[in-house]
Image (cartoon, coloured by chain):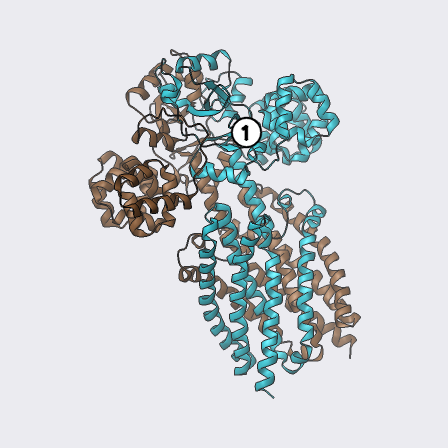
Chain colours: A cyan, B brown
C-alpha cells in the first residue's frame, strides 16, 4: 500500500495472490547482505536473481552498506529498472555515483525514467555534467525538461523537495470524468494522492483526495466535493517552513505554486519526513560543533577534517582563557587554592548555557517562538537563571569554604558562581535568537562557541573578584 | 484535503463552493489572537462567532497561547464539538485540563466522541480519574471500551500512538462490496487511508489504498488488487522503531497487530511526525541535561526545577575536579603557569566528547548503527581522535611553550592535550552505545555527564604528567 510497494508489484512480479501466514516485518540489512554474499559465493546466478527479487528494493539499498563495490555492482545489474531507481535513490551519495558510473547511459536513462522527476533531479545532481548530458539524450524531451526545471530550485526549499508529478483537473469536470481520465491515462497509484482542481490559468482552486472520489456520486461536479480551502506554499519556501505547515495541519501532501498562484508541484509527506530528519541531524551536529556529513562519513580522516575547524575555534577561545588566567599569575601565586575552582566555574557556566541554548534551538525549530514572544521567553530563562544561580551560588560558596578552608574564598566562589550561571543561561538564551534574526542557523551558535565565550567571561569575573576581595580582606 | 480540513468541512459550514482567488496560506497565531481579542472587546457575540468559524481549528489552538484564561474559555464555548476536539488535542496540556474543567461533562463527552479514539484516550489521560468516569458515562459503551483499551498502552509505543479506527474487510469481497460498505456506513473520509484485508480470525492479509479502489474493476475480488506484502508492527513496538519503519519504507500508515497477528489498529503518518519531533526534542533536551518539558514550561520556577538536578550532578563532578586540582597544590605553587591551561585541557576534552556523542546519538536514532557495526563505528571515531589529537596536541604544545615560556611546560600541555582529545572522543563514542545496549536513552549519557567525566580524567592526567615531568626535568 505504500506507493513503493505498489511500484514494485506493478513492475516486478505481477499481481501477488499468495498470502503469507504471518504479517511481514522489516528485514535486517545485515541478514540481507549475508544472504546476498552467500548467493554470490555459490556461483549460481539464478539463485542470486531469485533471492534479490524476494526482497523489497529498500532492503537491498540498506544492505548495500554491508557489501563491497564488486558485490554491489553484481547485485545492481540484476535489478529491474524500477528497483534500480529505488536503490539509486536510497544508497549513500558516493555509492550512487559509483553505481551510475558502472552503468551504461541508455540503461541509466531507463532507470531515471522510472523515478519521480524530483528524485531523478536529485540523482542527476550527483553526477558529472557530461554524464548528465549523455543521459538526458536518452530521455524524452518532456521529462528531461521537467528534471532540468526541478534541478533549478535550492535543495532545502519546497521547490527542491517537491515532485512535479501532480494530477490536476479543470473545475468543470465531474467525478466520473476524473476517474475515467486516471484510468485511461494509466496513472500509477503512487502518484494518486490528491487531484488538484485548477482554473483556466492552472491556478490552484481546490483539492480532492481519493476517499472523496470513492464517495462522490459519478455526476457530481468537482467544486461540489473538493476542499476549496487548500493551504499551499511557493517553491522558494524553506523546507523547514514547509515541514512545519505539514506537521501543524496534519497534511499528507502540500501543493506548491509559483508567484502567480499556478500549481507547479507538490511536496509529499515522505519528503517532509526526510526534511525533518535532515534538519534534526543539522541541529544536533551544529550544536556539537561538527557537520551533518559527520553522521555518514566513511573515513576517520573525513571525520577529523569536519571536526577540526570547530575544535580549533574553541581551542583559540580557551587560549584566551589561558591568557586571562596567566594575567592573574600574581593572584594565583598568593592564593593557589583559587585554581581548584577554575574548572568548576567554567564547566557550570558552560552547562547552564548549553541547557538554555538547546531549548532555544528546539523552540525555534518547532516554531513555538514567534517574534512577539521573544521578550517573554528571554524573561523566563532569565528568571530561571536567577533561581538556579542563587541556589548553586550558595552551595558552591559552602563547598568553596570547606575545600579551601577560608570564608573569604567561599564568598569569591559564591559570587563567581552566581555570575557564571546567570551569564551562561542568558547567553544560551539570547545568542540563538540573535543568530536566527540575522539568518544564521541558531544551532551553530549554541554549542562550543557559546561555551567558550562563557568560559572566558566567567573566569575573568571570578579571578577579578578574587583579586579585589582577597587583596582587600586578606592583607 | 488533509483529513482535519475535511472534518471541519463536514461538521462545520457545509460544503464550500465559494472559491478564493488566491491560494490560502497558513495564518500567524498572533494575528489570529489579536483579531479574537478585538472581537471580544467589541462586545458583539455574532462578530466573534463569525470570526471564529472563519479560522481553521488548528489556527485557533495556536492562538490560544496568546489569549488569557477568560478569553480562551469564551472562544472555546463557541466552537463546534469537532473544532473543540481539535483545539483540545492541540493546545498545551495544562490548557487542555483548564478548558476541560470549565466544560460540562455531557458536552465534553460529545467533544471526545468526535475525536479519533487514540486522541480521546490521550486527552482523558490528562484529566483526573473522577472526571474521566463521569465523562465515560456519557459515551456509548463500544467507544468508551476502545478508549480504555488504548489508554492501556505505554504512550511511547505503537499501541500508544495508534488509532483503533481502521476499516477492514474479509477476503471474499469485491471492490464494489467495499465501496458500497463505506458509503452506506458513512465512514468519514479522514478514516479512509487504507482498507485492510483480513481472514476469518481478523489476521492481517493485505491492504488496499483508495487509489487502488478507484482504479479496480467493480467485480474484482480484493485479493486480486490488494498489496499482500504488508509490513506491520505489534502494539508494544517502540514509537521510534515504528517511525524508522515508516520513514524507511515511505509508508502512509502502519498497521498494528497483536501477538497472534490480529489487526488492532494503525499508526498514521501524522502521528509518526509527532513521534519523530518528540524523540528529537527528547534527544536535544537530554543532551543538554534538561527535560523535554523544558521546551513547553510556563514558568521560570518550573524551568529551574527541571534543570537544577543536572546542574547539581555536574557541579558534583566538577567538585571532584576541584579536589584533583587541590591535591596538586604543591605542584601549582611551584609551577603556577600550569593553571593557565586547566580550562584549555578541560574544555577541549569536553568539546571533542560532545562532537562524538552528538553523532552517535543521531546515528543511533536514525538506526544507521546495527549491532554488528558498533565495532566499526568506534574504530572510525578512534581513528579521527588520533588524527585530531596529534594536530591539536602539537599546536597546544607550541602555544604552551610560548605562553608559559618553557619547552618542558609545552611538552606537558602537548601530551595532556593529546590525551584529552583521544579520551574525550572515545568516551563520547562509547558511552552512548553502552547506554543504548542496557536500555538507557543514549542522549542522557551524552551531555554534561560525559563532559564532567572527561574534565576530571583529563585534568588528572595533565597534572600528573606535570608532576612527573617537571619535577624530573626542572629540579
Specify the quadrant of the image occupied by residue A340. Answer: bottom right
Left or right: residue A411 compared with residue B232: right
Residue B405, x across and y down, in percent: 78, 72
Quadrant of the rendered image containing residue B62? top left
Q: Which residue is mark 1?
A: A258
Q: Is residue A3 above or below residue A233?
A: above
Q: Is residue B386 left or right of residue B148?
A: right
Seen as rendered, the residue at the extreme front is B42
Residue B164 seen by the camera: yes
B172 above or below B429? Answer: above
Residues packed near mark 1 inside 10 Å, few (<14), some (14 to 19) or many (20 plus): some
Tell me if residue B359 can be seen.
no
Report the front residue among B300 and A38: B300
Residue A414 image offset from top left, x and y in percent:
51, 75
Q: Is residue A14 left or right of residue B28?
A: right
Nearer to me, A376 or B256:
A376
Of B136 and B84, nearer the camera is B84
What is the x, y in percent for residue A57? Answer: 57, 27
Residue at left 65%, top 80%? A331
Amino acid at each position: 500500500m505504500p506507493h513503493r510497494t505498489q511500484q514494485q508489484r506493478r513492475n516486478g512480479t505481477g499481481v501477488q495472490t499468495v498470502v503469507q501466514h504471518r504479517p511481514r516485518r522489516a528485514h535486517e540489512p545485515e541478514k540481507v547482505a549475508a544472504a546476498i554474499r552467500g548467493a554470490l559465493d555459490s556461483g549460481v546466478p539464478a539463485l542470486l536473481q531469485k533471492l534479490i527479487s524476494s526482497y523489497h528494493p529498500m532492503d537491498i539499498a540498506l544492505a548495500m552498506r554491508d557489501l563491497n563495490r564488486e558485490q554491489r555492482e553484481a547485485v545492481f545489474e540484476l535489478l529491474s529498472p524500477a528497483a534500480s531507481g529505488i536503490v539509486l535513490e536510497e544508497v549513500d551519495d558516493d555509492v550512487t555515483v559509483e553505481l551510475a558510473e558502472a552503468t551504461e547511459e541508455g540503461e541509466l536513462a531507463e532507470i531515471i525514467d522510472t523515478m519521480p522527476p524530483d528524485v531523478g533531479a536529485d540523482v542527476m545532481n550527483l553526477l558529472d555534467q557530461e554524464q548528465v548530458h549523455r543521459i538526458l539524450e536518452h530521455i524524452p524531451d518532456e521529462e528531461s525538461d521537467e528534471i532540468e526545471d526541478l534541478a533549478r530550485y535550492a535543495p532545502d526549499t519546497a521547490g527542491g523537495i517537491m515532485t512535479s508529478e501532480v494530477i490536476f483537473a479543470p473545475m468543470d469536470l465531474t467525478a466520473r470524468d476524473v476517474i475515467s481520465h486516471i484510468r485511461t491515462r494509466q496513472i500509477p497509484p503512487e502518484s494518486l494522492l490528491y487531484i488538484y482542481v485548477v482554473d483556466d490559468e492552472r491556478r490552484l482552486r481546490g483539492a480532492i483526495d481519493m476517499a472523496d472520489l470513492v464517495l462522490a456520486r459519478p455526476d457530481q461536479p468537482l467544486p461540489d466535493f473538493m476542499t476549496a480551502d487548500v493551504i499551499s506554499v511557493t517553491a522558494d519556501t524553506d523546507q523547514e517552513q514547509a515541514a512545519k505547515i505539514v506537521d501543524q495541519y496534519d497534511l499528507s501532501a502540500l501543493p506548491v505554486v509559483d508567484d502567480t498562484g499556478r500549481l507547479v508541484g507538490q511536496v509529499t509527506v515522505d519528503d517532509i519526513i526526510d526534511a525533518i530528519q535532515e534538519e534534526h541531524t543539522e541541529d544536533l551536529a551544529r550544536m556539537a560543533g561538527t557537520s551533518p556529513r559527520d553522521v555518514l562519513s566513511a573515513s576517520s580522516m573525513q571525520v577529523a577534517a569536519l571536526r577540526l575547524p570547530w575544535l580549533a575555534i574553541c581551542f583559540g577561545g580557551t587560549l584566551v582563557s589561558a591568557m586571562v588566567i596567566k594575567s592573574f599569575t600574581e593572584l594565583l601565586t598568593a592564593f593557589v587554592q583559587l585554581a581548584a575552582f577554575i574548572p568548576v566555574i567554567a564547566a557550570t557556566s558552560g552547562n547552564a548555557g548549553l541547557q538554555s541554548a538547546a531549548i532555544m534551538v528546539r523552540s525555534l525549530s518547532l516554531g513555538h517562538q514567534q517574534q512577539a514572544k521573544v521578550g517573554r521567553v528571554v524573561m523566563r530563562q532569565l528568571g530561571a537563571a536567577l533561581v538556579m544561580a542563587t541556589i548553586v551560588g550558595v552551595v558552591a560558596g559552602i563547598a568553596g569554604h570547606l575545600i579551601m578552608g577560608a570564608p573569604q574564598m567561599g564568598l569569591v566562589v559564591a559570587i563567581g558562581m552566581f555570575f557564571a550561571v546567570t551569564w551562561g543561561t542568558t547567553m544560551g538564551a539570547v545568542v540563538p535568537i540573535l543568530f536566527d534574526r540575522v539568518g544564521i542557523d541558531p544551532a551553530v551558535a549554541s554549542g562550543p562557541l557559546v561555551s567558550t565565550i562563557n568560559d572566558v567571561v566567567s573566569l575573568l569575573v571570578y579571578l577579578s573578584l578574587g583579586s579585589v576581595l582577597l587583596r582587600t580582606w586578606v592583607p
